[in-house]
Amino acid sequence: MYLSLLKSLNRLNPRAWDFIQLTRIDKPIGIYLLLWPTLWAVWIAGKGSPSLSTLLIFVVGVFLMRAAGCVINDFADRKVDGHVKRTEQRPLVSGRVTSKEALVLFAVLVTLSFVLVLFTNATTIWLSFGGLALAACYPFMKRYTYYPQVVLGAAFSWGMPMAFTAETGELPAAAWLLYIANLLWTVGYDTYYAMTDREDDLKIGVKSTAVLFGDADRVIILTLQCLALFCLMLAGTRFELGLYFFIGLLVAAGCFGWEFWSTRDKDPQACFRAFLHNHWAGLAIFVGIVMDYALR
């Protein structure tokens, strides 16, 4: 139904699909992976009853900033994507969208996101500039460092401290445990993603943790996931979360175990499925948080 609605826009405007693909609205996995940890923080900051305004601001903000991140990523990679089989038909590479159009769209999406932040408070507004800087510089990191996934993790986690300041006006130290946990988790699942393109990346000189980790990739990913769960356990203790939260962590641990097993042959498609599967881990943790507050 979701894709049908998007394709109906294409019938109204033949170029609509080009911009839908540029923003990856047709592939919501990135929205999910950004949304769940943001909602962890929103729910914990609101002690199970976050304000409707905070909830709406961050849900819509996730949608806009993920789209903006995809646009600036494709702009940065417009001369690289054509050499990678999976990305060779993206709108900027194929010329269906111009670089100028992409930059204008990025500016519009970022401006709309900033307007949302203006409905919060001064601390959250100041924090938003850090999030924008991380989102804007991440796509260019793969040219200079083997750790672009770390920058992505920092960007994908930035909404978490913002959620606390927006909801409570304060930023407790324990909130950084959530931030670190999500950063570690993001590096893990994005390494699975990078493993799908590793052979092409090696040929064209693009850097990633998948290239850096080499044969130890899956073991390092599982280690990162376990460290993320440990940080979440510490955060849960600090925020006095109970049984259902820890059940959510247990389900997430099962997801991580399945991903490790399913990628044992390092088949690129299996790695991509493992990347997609992380959505369920994030959802399980969120459901655990919601149930813990609702049923205590």
Image (cartoon, grey):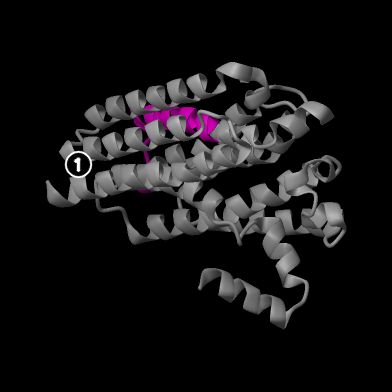
Viewer can see residue 273 = yes
Q: As drawn, which residue projects farthest toward the bottom? A: 12
Q: Is residue 25 left or right of residue 220?
A: right
The type of residue carrying mark 1 is: Tyr
Residue pictured at 63% horizontal, 19% vertical: 214
**Label 1's element?**
helix
Judge whether 196 appears above or below 116 on screen.
Answer: above
The residue nearer to you, when weighing 263 against 160, is: 263
- Camera-side residue of 127 and 21: 21
Find residue 271 and report its image quarter.
top right
Residue 82, position as x, y percentages in the image: 84, 45
> Is 238 in front, or is 291?
291
* Residue at 77% over, 54% down: 90
Magenta-tinted stretch: 166-189
The dominant secondary structure in magenta is helix
Count of number-bearing discs? 1
Q: Which residue is mark 1?
A: 244
